[in-house]
Amino acid sequence: MATVATTAPLLHRFLGIGQVLLAAVAVFFNYRGGIAKDGDSVMLPVAYVLVGVCAVLVAVALLILKPRVPIRPLEQPVDAYWGTPSTVAQIFRVWFLLEGAGVLSAVAYLLTGAPVAAIAMILTIGTYWFCGPAMFAKA
């Protein structure tokens, strides 16, 4: 039976792989013609609204939720840190908001094809990978 100490970092990896695959699909479909029609004036405001929501999600995750995650004391083993349910729950909140921002930005790019959505997609996915298990456990 796998423990939380081994499944939490694995969950981060699988969520990140899903984000990258979704981004690849969005890029592929936009390369092949995309959903948005040229000259569609409705799609650009939609892109900005969705990117704004993504920015709020990332800001909440990094500025509000991430500082609440307890720092691992140097004498505490990494497995014990990941085995603490309250700590893992707080880390999951950060990851799930960043995951949501990445998915939403990929959907925004898929629907609109706007460059601002592509930039947001790259930044949110990069931020998600940057806030991985090593950042919290400081192993």
Image: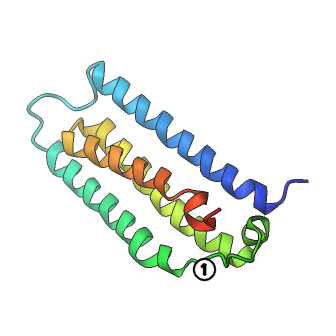
Q: In the image, residue 6 lies at what x, y percent?
A: 77, 55
Rendered view: 123 above or below 97: above
Q: Label 1 crowding class (10 Å Cα cut-off): few <14, some 14-19, many 20+?
A: some
Placement of 5 over or under 105, stated as above or below: below
Residue at left offset 34%, top offset 44%: 122
Q: How many marks?
A: 1
Spot occupied by residue 62 in the image (x, y as percentages of width and height): 42, 69
Frontmost residue, 84 versus 18 = 84
Residue 33 vertical position relative to residue 86 in the rendered view, above or below:
above
Secondary structure of the residue carrying tag 1 is loop
37 or 12, which is in the foreground? 12
Q: Quadrant location of the C terminus?
A: bottom right
* Colour basis: rainbow
Does residue 74 lie above or below 36 as drawn? below
What residue did someone put label 1 on?
Answer: 70
Q: 21 or 36, which lies in front?
A: 21
Q: Is residue 55 left or right of residue 60?
A: left
